[in-house]
Image (cartoon, rainbow, N blue to C red):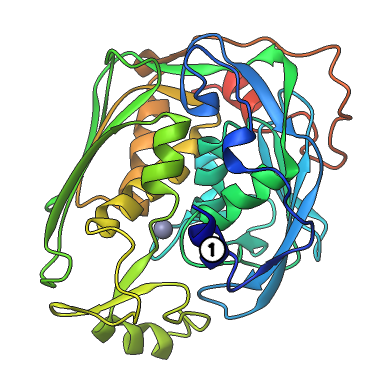
Amino acid sequence: MDAMVGDAIGSGYATKTCETPARAVQISGPSGNGGLVGGAVQQHTLKSSIHCMGVGLHSGRKVSLGLHPAAAGTGIIFRRTDLGIDIPARFDHVVDTRLCTVLADPAHPTARIGTVEHVMAALAGCGVSNALVTLDGPEAPILDGSAAGFTFLIDCAGLRAQHADAPVIEILRSVVVQEGESAAELHPGGTFPGLSATLSIDFAAAAIGSQEMSLDMTGENFRSMLAPARTFTQLHEVDQLRRAGLALGGSLDNAVVVDGEKVLNPGGLRMADEFVRHKLLDVVGDLALAGAVLHGRFIGHRSGHAMNNRLLRAVFAEPANWRLATEHDASTDDVPALSGRSGRQGNRMAIAAAPF
Ligand SMILES: [Zn+2]
């Protein structure tokens, strides 16, 4: 764990020394699983602010990221500090999914924030219901290509329980989106009170091949099985991406690169099935844009950011597909509401009030 965290921060640095071992962070809930599970789970925010620096995978730009406490009911809000614009982390603010998940406020479509999925996955996986994420550029830092650096930062900041139950979106009807050989599905039920997920991938590159994983999305499972898994690409794609002005910050320090049957990173893989684990990590981050804990069963095959987002849009397009199981706002919370246009109209409140 220590080595993994050290690697995670290798291409960025935390500006606060972490004195809290990951295991020491206490998350309440029926099974201690924090924000990924349903049931009577309290909302949580960060105890304090924390920052890191890193580069954007696609822009290659150096960027400063801050994670800050936010009031109960706020949800996750991204703020472009260089532009003074807030963007709620919500599925209907996703404007691009070709290589990563990109958010923008419809009123300011050019003020984008890219590669939000790994920080979103870490926040969801660590049980953070409410937070302000500040960035001084157009893309979240890639760090080591996994979510481990962000979970490290969250552990450093610590969690604080808030006086409100976490809302839970219960899937009531099966919803399936499909394109070619890709499919993403959400189904009701499951014995686990949160999200259970099964994902399969199938790549021509022999180093990746076919991999499948099923997981109940507990906080513990997220931390140990998904958070360290790095993003990946194939060598022949790197030149194409660079010619298109993308992956400018990419390197073997922040992505697994495969060439046929070979893994080009000198250290090899962290886990034999690191590829499907990373894709499942992306699912957690992308589905966290629902704005609340999902209770249901996810099944994906060769799905990526585009399908994950289409799935959420399809779920919320029909009111009969879902219901908000829990929603109590906090009147006694001691974290002030965010200033700016979004404020307490963050993603959670918008979900509750949206005319879907
Ligand atoms: Zn990813």
Look at the picture and state if 247 lies above or below 89: below
State the image quarter where residue 40 is shown.
Answer: top right
Ligand 1 shown in quarter: bottom left
Question: Around disc 1, counting alpha carbons within 10 Å, would you say few (fewer than 14), some (14 to 19), or many (20 or more)?
Answer: many
- Tell me where residue 256 appears, x and y as whole percent: 34, 72
User: Measuring 80% from the left and 34% from the top, which residue is drawn there?
Assistant: 343
Label 1 SS? helix
User: Measuring 61% from the left and 60% from the top, which residue is drawn there?
Assistant: 113
- Tell me where residue 353 appears, x and y as whole percent: 62, 19
Q: Is residue 309 visible?
A: no
Q: Nearer the viewer, residue 41 or 302?
A: 41
**To which residue does mark 1 refer?**
8
Look at the picture and state if 270 lies above or below 56: above
Drawn side of residue 7 relative to residue 111, left or right:
left
Q: Amino acid at mark 1?
A: Ala
User: Measuring 57% from the left and 78% from the top, which residue is drawn there?
Assistant: 59
